[in-house]
Image (cartoon, rainbow, N blue to C red):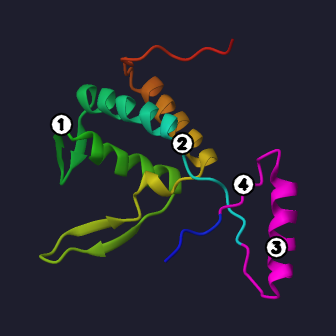
């Protein structure tokens, strides 16, 4: 399957790109469905939150199955994704237990990625997390 054309409404060229696309579809004498969606998270956002998740994992224990443990950054990511989304789907595991579904940061929009980073900062502030990277300052 071909990769779909992604129209970024935030692009300053967006009106012209969309007009050209519609004209091209019309010239072909065919119809098409155009899906307008926010672009997904950036690689810079991804590179920002993994060190933050590592910092949290090294400095804070997580309550798992009634016991405080030193959880992996991947586990903390799922906890923060659940907090960001305000809801997670839960499935029964093959051998019992539960599995959280839908915890992928890959599907976050750029806006949601920013919200995810802000959530990490807020948690860090409330729990005295010392960040390994200095806070970014506005110029």
Residue at (49% x, 29% y) in the render = 121
| Image: magenta residue range | 6-34
- Is residue 46 magenta-colored? no
CB-based contact (under 8 Å), mark 3 and mark 1 = no
Give the residue number, with chain letter if any, for mark 2. Answer: 42
How much space separates mark 4 and mark 2, taking CA atoms? 13 Å
Distance from Cα at disc 3 to Cα at disc 1: 56 Å
- Residue 28 part of the magenta-drawn span: yes
Furthest residue toward bottom: 30
* Residue 60 position in % (x across, y down): 27, 30
- Earlier residue among tags 4 and 1: 4
For disc 3, the neighbor class at 10 Å (few under 14, some 14 to 19, many from 20) is few
Q: Mark 1 points at which residue?
A: 70
Counting residues from the N terminus, which is met first, the one under dot 3 or under dot 4? Answer: 4
Query: What's the distance in space between the residues labelled 1 and 2, CA to CA?
Result: 28 Å
Question: What whole-number distance in Å separates the C-alpha atoms at marks 3 and 4?
Answer: 18 Å
Tags 1 and 2 touching, CB below 8 Å: no
- SS of the residue under disc 3: helix
Please name the residue that numbered disc 4 is placed on. Answer: 8
- Toward which corner of the image does residue 106 lie, by quadrant? bottom left
Does 47 sit left or right of 14 as displayed? left
């Amino acid at each position: 399957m071909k990769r779909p054309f992604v129209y970024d409404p935030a692009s300053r060229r967006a009106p012209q790109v969309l007009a050209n696309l519609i004209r091209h579809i019309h010239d072909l004498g065919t119809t098409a469905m155009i899906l307008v969606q926010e672009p997904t998270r950036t690689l810079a956002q991804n590179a920002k939150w993994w060190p933050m998740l590592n910092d949290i994992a090294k400095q804070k224990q997580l309550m798992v199955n009634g016991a405080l443990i030193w959880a992996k950054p991947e586990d903390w990511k799922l906890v923060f994704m659940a907090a960001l989304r305000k809801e997670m789907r839960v499935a029964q595991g093959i051998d019992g237990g539960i599995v959280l579904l839908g915890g992928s940061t890959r599907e976050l929009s750029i806006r949601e990625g920013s919200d995810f980073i802000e959530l990490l900062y807020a948690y860090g502030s409330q729990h005295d997390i010392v960040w390994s990277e200095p806070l970014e300052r506005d110029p």
